[in-house]
Image: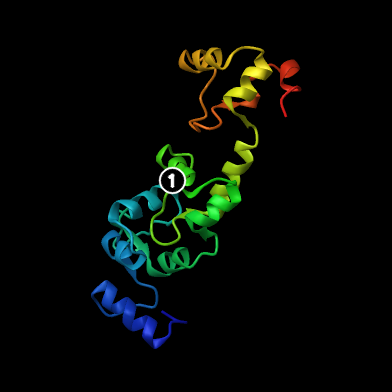
């Protein structure tokens, strides 16, 4: 690969367990996981999401298990990846809340030291700006918080999966929504 320092080349050859003979070799999921410091399952998830592109083998075999080393390295060095602490700052929440968002799939966890994508976090922030707490939803609907719970339980309102802001403002009648700040 062009643009690699001698030390980086040696490091990659050690990680891959073979010399870098091709200018941009195809590597398997296990090798990509080693280079990224992730599990093979996490790499498969990145491939499914499109974050890491699949590549056709020269012999025409299935492309679902091979990646270009340059794609893996570019993803690893992407400035769009951020830490949990940075995500917490963007969202105005604790790092525990960020982990909760990944557990309920509001954010995708990519693993490693930079496990989140800034664009995912910013998208969630924008979405959460339109989500309401139970108190805000009960004020807007002019019902008790218990009644809001009941509406969520019966699916009359769809839960956002964010326990601190369970109601999307868009679900509320427009004339009552204006009173919510």
- Residue at image position (34%, 55%) is 43
Question: Does residue 49 lie above or below 55 as drawn?
Answer: above
- Residue at image position (46%, 63%) is 75
- Residue at image position (62%, 18%) is 138
Question: Does residue 19 lie above or below 50 as drawn?
Answer: below
Percent position (x, y) of residue 46? 40, 52
Residue 26: in sight, yes or no?
yes
Residue 58: in sight, yes or no?
no
Percent position (x, y) of residue 50? 45, 51
Q: Which residue is mark 1?
A: 99
Along the viewing direction, whichever of 113 and 16 lies nearer the viewer: 113
Question: Does residue 147 lie above or below 121 as drawn?
Answer: above
Percent position (x, y) of residue 25? 35, 72
Mark 1 falls on what kind of element?
A: helix
Along the viewing direction, whichever of 141 and 170 lies nearer the viewer: 141
Left or right: residue 157 compared with residue 44: right
Q: Residue furthest left?
A: 17
Question: Does residue 25 lie above or below 172 as drawn?
Answer: below
Q: Quadrant of the N terminus?
A: bottom left
Percent position (x, y) of residue 76? 44, 65
Along the viewing direction, whichever of 65 and 89 lies nearer the viewer: 89
Left or right: residue 30 compared with residue 84: left
Q: Identify the image quadrant of residue 165.
A: top right
């Amino acid at each position: 690969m062009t643009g690699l320092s001698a030390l980086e080349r040696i490091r990659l050859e050690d990680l891959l367990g073979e010399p870098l003979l091709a200018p941009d070799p195809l590597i398997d999921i296990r090798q990509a996981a080693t280079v990224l410091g992730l599990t093979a399952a996490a790499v498969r998830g990145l491939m499914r999401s499109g974050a890491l592109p699949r590549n056709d083998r020269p012999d025409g075999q299935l492309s679902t298990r091979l990646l270009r080393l340059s794609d893996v390295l570019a993803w690893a060095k992407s400035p769009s990846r951020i830490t949990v602490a940075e995500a917490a700052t963007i969202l105005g929440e604790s790092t525990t809340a960020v982990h909760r968002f990944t557990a309920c799939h509001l954010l995708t966890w990519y693993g490693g030291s930079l496990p989140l994508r800034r664009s995912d976090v910013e998208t969630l922030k924008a979405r959460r700006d339109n989500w309401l707490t139970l108190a805000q939803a009960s004020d807007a609907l002019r019902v008790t918080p218990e009644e809001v719970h009941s509406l969520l339980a019966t699916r009359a309102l769809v839960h956002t999966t964010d326990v601190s802001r369970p109601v999307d403002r868009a679900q509320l009648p427009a004339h009552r929504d204006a009173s919510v700040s």
